[in-house]
Image (spheres, rainbow, N blue to C red):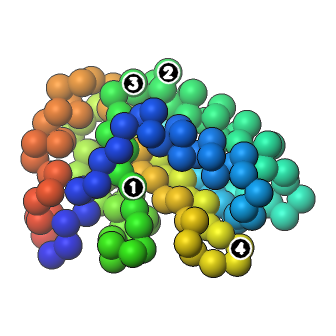
Amino acid sequence: MAILFKTTITENTAFEMIERSLSGAYRYDGYLNVVSDAGETALSWGPAMHAEEFKAEVSQILRQTWDAARFWVIYERREDRRDPEGTDIRNAAFRLTRGYSGVIVVTLSLLGKRDSANDLELVFVCFEQDFHRRNFRVRYEGKPLPNQG
């Protein structure tokens, strides 16, 4: 079985990558997906939306997530490493964290309109409690996932 939780990056690195992607001249399609016990919210970068508008909405959602669950683990997904799909990582994170209270899983994908060379895909697994984050990392990072069945 694939190892899904293996490439962590720091919060600062994630924010720098987002800033660089959304402030540059490179053109993207993008979406942000938030899954929690409260439900699921999706934000798409519509054709009429400017990069600054999408960036402001992403920033607002990430701020709200931080206010609700401050202890983050951020995974970078890349095609050149043949990482599993971002949706698979998100779904696994949400499934594996059901025993923890208040977990929020956020997926941000910025996909190049011309090619995939500058794609950015991040999965934020956000916990209310630091010991939940530590427990998740010890149990699942770099390890094969248990069977779903």
- Which mark is in front, 3 or 4? 4
Q: Quadrant of the N terminus?
A: bottom left
Quadrant housing residue 69: top left
Give amino acid for label 2.
Answer: Asp
CB under 8 Å between discs 2 and 4: no
Quick one: SS at disc 4? loop
Quick one: SS at disc 2? helix
CB under 8 Å between discs 1 and 3: no
What residue would you read off at disc 1?
Answer: 76
Marks 2/3: CA–CA distance: 6 Å
CB under 8 Å between discs 1 and 4: no
What residue would you read off at disc 2?
Answer: 67
Q: Residue at x 47, y 47 (%)?
A: 106
Quadrant housing residue 131: top left
50 left or right, relative to 54? right
Quick one: SS at disc 1? strand
CB under 8 Å between discs 2 and 3: yes
For residue 57, say whether it is visible: yes
User: Which x, y percent locates residue 121?
Assistant: 49, 59
For residue 40, say whether it is visible: no
Give amino acid for label 1.
Answer: Glu
User: Which x, y percent locates residue 76?
Assistant: 39, 55
Whichever of labels 1 and 4 marks the residue nearer the N terminus, that label is 1
Disc 4 packing (10 Å; few <14; some 14–19; many ≥20)? few
Q: Residue at x 20, y 73 (%)?
A: 2
